[in-house]
Image (cartoon, helix red, strand yellow):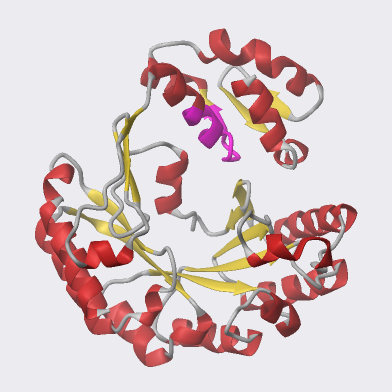
Amino acid sequence: MDAYVARLCDELTSRASEATDHNVDTIYFGGGTPTLLSPAHFARLLDAIRAHYVLDGDVEITVECNPATADEEKLCALRRLGVNRLSIGAQSAIDEELASLGRIHTFEETKKTYRAARAAGFDNISLDVMFGIPHQTVDSFGRTLDEILSLAPEHISAYSLIVEPDTPFFEAGDTLPLPDEDAVCEMSDLLLARLRDAGYERYEISNFARGGKRSHHNLHYWSMDDYLGFGPAAHSLVGAVRTGHSRDLFAYLEGRDITEPEETLDETTARDEYVMLRLRLSDGVSKKDFSARFGQEFDELYAAAAEKFVAAGLLVDTPERIYFTDRGFSVSNTVLSEMLFD
């Protein structure tokens, strides 16, 4: 960990020129279990950032947190360092379901971590939950929602399980005890109803907030704003140029260059990606903003392709913007694939 943090500090320092024309308004420690690091490690990283980058006075600093790797002492230390947002990977309130996901924590540990975060002074906490996972039923997911809502976090991220190739779940095939499609649809409907009743705004396909506590960091991704990523497997987007790092941790620690070939987005790709990402948001695409960004009218490029989805009640198209309905969100991948890439 010492070597990794030292290498990250070197990278933060050497790449500072890439942010000369930017103020940093969000910092996000993620991509694994950053709370395995000590407060001293975080202090070194934040010192490096503050020394070489211009930070907004109200910069949002988020740390992803595994409930088994953070206690009140560590969380108090993070809060003193300026961390002001936590994203806690709760996933489920049912311990059997957590075990099936390979999680090393129990839900009792999630609650303990959550209470410790409140005691440390955090007033912006997000909890991650999953549905469609092994052994889960509509009833058990309802119990998870009961428990999550009783904690009253400012933000909830809710994702359905996607079984990716080359993973243990994929290898398990039909032996994996997953709920069927009808049950997953019921879980999704239950999620939307329960969170709406509890005062949460669905501002993105899988993200809900109340009290104005949207994730500003993730909003930058969905708006295709510039961002810099540091460390193995991190990616950056500056203007129309996307760069990334390989996952080779040992090469990174040895100081070798792990930068992968950069990709310059052509005009069509940039437009399509912007529309795809913005349509993830409940606000959808502002036609005025689209025109200012690309110098072309949204309706001239996309209105014909969107027409049948509007007629089917999956999209709402107004003179000012276009956005998904709740029903449209549930089939958004299909709609976007046909609308943008056919």
Nearer the observer, 270 or 22: 270
Query: How many callouts does the rendering have?
Result: 0
Residue 14 in the image: x percent, y percent? 11, 54
Image quarter in which the C terminus is found: top right
Residue lying at 17% horizontally and 58% vertically, measured from the top left:
11
Residue 212 in the image: x percent, y percent? 50, 55
Q: Is residue 267 above or below residue 210?
A: above
Image quarter in which the N terminus is found: bottom left
Q: Is residue 301 above or below residue 310?
A: above
Residue lying at 32% horizontally and 80% vertically, measured from the top left:
37
Nearer the observer, 60 or 246: 246
Q: Is residue 186 above or below residue 71?
A: above
Residue 206 in the image: x percent, y percent? 62, 52
Please, which residue is most extreme toward the top here? 300
Residue 162 in the magenta stretch? The answer is no
Residue lying at 52% horizontally and 15% vertically, measured from the top left:
298
Residue lying at 33% horizontally and 60% vertically, measured from the top left:
248
Residue 277 in the image: x percent, y percent? 52, 36
Q: Is residue 330 above or below residue 178?
A: above
Give the quadrant of residue 71: bottom left
Left or right, residue 107 beside residue 49: right
Left or right, residue 88 beside residue 259: right
Numbered range of the magenta stretch = 273-285
